[in-house]
Amino acid sequence: MITLRNKIGQMLVMGFDGCDIHDKSPVAEWLSTDGLGGVLLFDQDASTGLYGKNLKNPAQIKRLIHQLNYYSSEINFKNNGVPLLIAIDYEGGAIDRLSRIEGCMPTMSARSMAQLSPEDLQAELTQMAFTLKSFGFNLNFAPVVDLHLQDEEGIIGSLQRSFSNNPEEVVRLAKKFVDTFYQYGIACCYKHFPGHGSALGDTHKDFVDVTVTFKKEELTPYYRLLKDNYKPTMVMTAHVVNKQLDKQELPATLSPDILTGLLRETIGYDGVIIADDLQMQAITDHYSLEDALCRTINAGADMIIFANQITKITAPEVIEVIERLVFEQKIEPQRIEDAYRRIIRLKQQIQCIELVE
């Protein structure tokens, strides 16, 4: 029987320490008790600056992913046999968690990909998708569909993470990106809603307000791309404040006006909304864990990332807070049910591609 805790567990994507896991590893226990929606693997440990947090070499990565699937298998069987999401940030260029792994090809930034011929772009994306598939990943937190609106500041344009300042080009290239990864059984994630491209700051470090710099065309990729809902994709929130879209001045991740009002009701999106890492300082410096969880789930987020990079938290701790918020009627049980339905549907879409292969 699927419990409330199992359903909440499906809402979590957790980072963890270690390149090898066994029966006593915390993440193995999380996977085999309440279960998790997914895990997120990193090359670098942000708290120490050292490389090798989860990813060291090809054989080790394949072994770790096999272990993760093994420990999650019993719970996954209960959840209609759906797979564990095994995620990575693999945009290309500056955001490439495999860049130091022997045998992995160097990747190009989104900005550089946009300059390629159709044939060369297809070759680049095919190689990237094949690489992830060969290791066993099934979720890529990419592509970025933010517009290139700042060259020097912020964390999008300055790192060449955006395809273009032209929304039509962003739509065209993002479609090609998603289509290619889809062919290899890998789900993708459009980010960062409702737009991070005009931001002058970094939400990893504090609040970023885009009210003055935000342009309405930053929403165009979402209106265009989210009609194609038969492919396994999700949308990641931004922690930016945008008073044009939310008069309460809440970060988008915590905003009912932005996630439910704009993304669900106006754009008409019924897929998985995933909150970007709730351990970023834009959130932790201003909201308690309980308040952030209550707000983002009530705002419309279905899944939540805890990267466990700077600070550490366990999955049972998060599950207990959400479970208590449900019991205290601060989160409606239907909100959990809706999230669970969307997550299982996404995982079944991934499973269907794998069965076809």
Image (cartoon, rainbow, N blue to C red):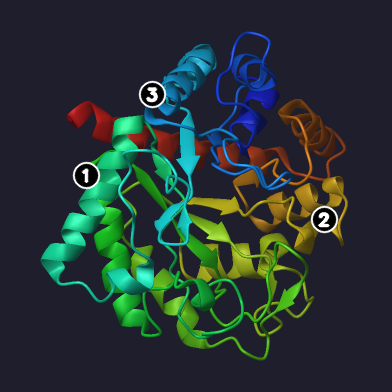
Q: Kindly report which numbered mark, 2 or 3, lies closer to the viewer in this rendering.
A: 3
Left or right for 143, reference 305: left
Kind of element beneath mark 3: helix
Residue that label 2 marks: 284
**CA gap, disc 2 and disc 3:** 36 Å
Q: Which residue is tagged 1? A: 183
**Count of marks overlaid on the render:** 3
View extreme (top): residue: 23
Q: Report which residue position mark 3 lands on.
A: 59
**Among the 4 quarters of the image, the one containing residue 177:** bottom left
- Residue type at mark 1 is Gln
Q: Nearer the viewer, residue 246 or 329?
A: 246
In what element is the residue under mark 1? Answer: helix
Note whether 314 is above or below 236 in the view shown: above
**Which mark sits nearer the N-terminus, 2 or 1?**
1
Residue 270 appears in the picture as rendered: no
Q: Is residue 254 left or right of residue 129?
A: right
The furthest residue to the bottom: 212
